[in-house]
Amino acid sequence: MKRRNLFITSAAAAGTAVIGPSAPARARGPKVKTGIEVLARDGFRELSGQRVGMISNPTGVLPDLTHEVDLMHQSGKVDIAAVYGPEHGFRGTSQAGEGEDFFTDPRTGLPVYNAYNDRDQMADLLEQAGVETVVFDIQDVGSRFYTYIWTMYLVLEAAASLGLRFVVLDRPNPITGTEATGPVLHEENATFVGLKPIAQRHGMTVGELATLFNARFVPEAVGDSADLTVVRMEGWKRSTPFDRTGLPWVAPSPNMPTPGTAELYPGTCLFEATALSEGRGTTQPFQLLGAPELDHEWALALNRLGLSGVGFREAYFKPVFSKWAGEVCGGAEVQTDAPHRADPIRTALAMILEQRRLFPQYGWRSQDGGGSYWLDKLTGNTAVRLAVEAGAPLDEVESVWAEDLAAFRELRAEHLLYGED
């Protein structure tokens, strides 16, 4: 098949190649072509003659909902040595904090390994399967604490240490890529919900994050960058919301049912760190928030704040699992009347401040004997919790991370692959 309108150039990151249109793509209407579509259109030539390890999950589909692993396997043009599933698994059967145990995929007969592992375990699994090129294609949701980007990072480290090629098939940031906001991780708070200092809402695609990781963090860890290639999307602009891409939404994880959930998640996921339910075990995770003793006063107080792009409805719900399972919770439903103007992190912190004022009996979750708080892991910055505990005004809480965020925005700008033209 003739190769059309493609090029490979040096990206900002050392050792990175970027594949994409040689001129601004002219998609018809809002249609966006993902990296896998660009790769398939070119007959998978980028993977020719290589033993491939695929890191994917249910989101790795083409617009007709065919899964990329099924397509590659059926094509006979890609030698897939093994498949690796992140948190929740390759076929998506596991809940939060779990991967899938090894199995043989019944549709393709391919071995499927658990990629919800550290770098050394991943290196062993890649070597065991004889992988020469790792391909990553998973839909991210734009938040630092969504673990798929850290699976990507750890496998980048493994690829660099083993001398393997790493290919990212890019997909949209569903909450747009216009800006980075929120706290930046301090490395003393590093966990698998945030391993490196990026902003809570990073405003990047997985391909862009890969170039940043490969240039800045991978060499620090293993002494060299990986041989990285990003297969770019066509037709995506930084301000494009997911509902304008023309792409199907496949839930990236069991508690991310809609793009609207993803819009709120960079902020309302912070309720995981409180005694309140964050809506897990309901049909509106990260949108319904509450606990048994909360009532209408919370929503009334929140609406009086006049936060941009959001409103609050008095709500009652009964989770079927997770916090307060089987108990009636009072609280609030967050409605986004202008989702792309809403600031989910500011919204969530305002909600926490008001909840602590009105219902102080509900405190933080996951304090261990050593004084560790889950909120510090999610925000990445202990000073955020201390400001909230002191009852600081909302603007003062946000000022805690201003200097860190300015520095991250400068770093981020070096690795952006898409513009508005």
Image: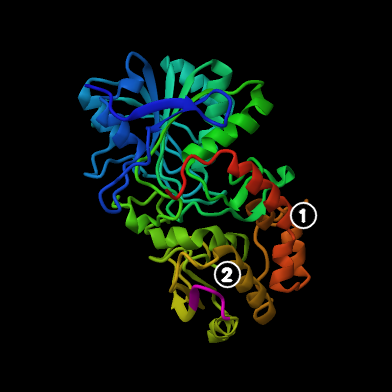
Q: Is residue 117 above or below residue 275?
A: above
Which residue corresponds to the image point at 40% horizontal and 57% vertical from the top-left?
A: 241
Q: Quadrant of residue 304?
A: bottom right
Three-letter code for the amino acid on which mark 2 is drawn: Thr
Residue 274: tell me if it is visible: yes
Residue 371, label in figure: 1
Residue 305, label in figure: none
Q: Is residue 16 above or below residue 247?
A: above
Q: Position of residue 1 (x, y in %)?
A: 21, 21
The kind of secondary structure element at disc 1 is: loop
Task: Give the overall secondary structure of the magenta segment.
Answer: loop
Three-letter code for the amino acid on which mark 1 is drawn: Gly
Residue 347, label in figure: 2
Please state the total of marks drawn on the protein image: 2
The kind of secondary structure element at disc 2 is: helix
Which residue corresponds to the image point at 78% horizontal and 70% vertical from the top-left?
A: 390
Q: Which of the two residues, 245 or 192, is positioned nearer the viewer here?
A: 245
Residues in magenta, as a range:
306-311
Q: Is residue 351 magenta?
A: no
Position of residue 392 in the picture relative to residue 411 (left or right): right
Position of residue 402 in the picture relative to residue 315 (left or right): right
Q: Which of the two residues, 220 or 100, is positioned nearer the viewer here?
A: 220
Which residue corresponds to the image point at 54% horizontal and 64% vertical from the top-left?
A: 344
